[in-house]
Image (cartoon, grey):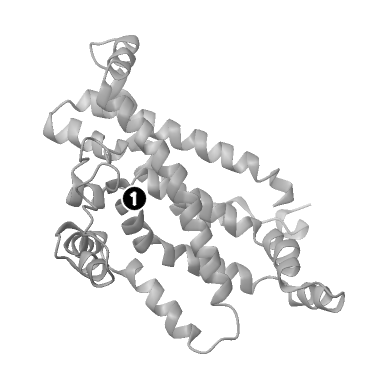
Amino acid sequence: MSDAASGRPRASTLTLFLGPALALLVITRLAPFAVSIKQAFGGDESVGAVLAALWDSPNFIDSVGTTLWFSLLINPFQIALALGLAVVLTQKLPGTGILRTLIFIPVAVPPAVSAIVWGLALRNPDGLVNGVLSAVGFEPQPFLLSPEQALWSIIVIASWIGVGYWMVLLIAGIQDVPRDLLEAGLVDGAGWWRRFWHITVPALRRPLLFVLVADTVANFLLFVPVQLLTRGGPDGSTNLLMHDIYRQAFVYGDRQFAAAEVVVLILLMMVVVGVQMRLLGPEEDL
């Protein structure tokens, strides 16, 4: 039986549609990763020596810990905020279209511009945020100058930039939830929370998985706010692994060490994403 008769797409059709995407994946993702592996472990030093250099580097160890802690804090916060906004803005409330647009605007603004604006608002004692705090009776805060507050400030800035995008994806997922299921729950006497938890959330597992994985990758690769506002400081409190890679490669000129850090970063992302997909259940249940 031919492919056309069986209803299966021909190989040429699959190549036509998937070929460009696969080629782009190879060129922009797999090839650079292979180059990084070659730069890291293809020199005169042995693999063991390169790994030992990483292990003996306090900056590298600290940046890995900071990156994991940052991801643990920001990912649940961003997804919960995006989901909450998506739920609110899919209700029949006045002005939801305008609110969606306003929340999405930061996504369209270049990250460097957002970082500079937030830097002006947070860095100076007489900046906008401290001006508001002073107006309501609080002391000015050293948001970007304090080791205890700088990472939280970066979390706020990164969330301002990214939450609107995740919100739009989750709005689309909520709008795809079958109406008959929600109406059946309403007829059975289920309240709003029970309908949301037992009908909407299970129907959102695919969009939530995509948002979780994409958000995790985006935050592992976060660079612009850190580079423009804190340069990894103060006291290394915002020295994420992506920033440490940049510093090793372009400030200290140690390209081999930076390439080894890139390999570690990719492996960390793969492990974290794998755990996330495992925790969300088998693929056939999604």
* Residue for point 44% across, 80% down: 99
Q: Is residue 245 above or below residue 158?
A: above
The residue tagged 1 is: 152
Graded by Cα atoms within 10 Å as few (under 14), some (14 to 19) or many (20 or more), the crowding at tag 1 reads some
Left or right of residue 176, residue 93 in this image: left
- The reply to whether residue 198 is in sight is yes
Left or right of residue 277, residue 157 in this image: left
- The reply to whether residue 19 is in sight is no
Could you say which is closer to the camera, residue 3 or residue 142?
Answer: 142
Could you say which is closer to the camera, residue 122 or residue 238?
Answer: 122
Query: Residue 114 is drawn in which quadrant?
Result: bottom left
* Residue for point 42% across, 37% down: 68
Outermost residue to the right: 188
Q: Is residue 175 above or below residue 57?
A: below
Residue 44: percent from left, percent from top: 23, 11
Residue 39: percent from left, percent from top: 26, 24
Q: Is residue 38 above or below residue 46?
A: below
Outermost residue to the front: 137
The residue type indicated by label 1 comes to Trp
Outermost residue to the bottom: 94
* Residue for point 47% across, 84% down: 97
Residue 258: percent from left, percent from top: 25, 29
Query: Residue 41 is drawn in which quadrant?
Result: top left
Left or right of residue 159, residue 286 in this image: right
Residue 33: percent from left, percent from top: 36, 34
Query: Residue 125 is drawn in which quadrant?
Result: bottom left
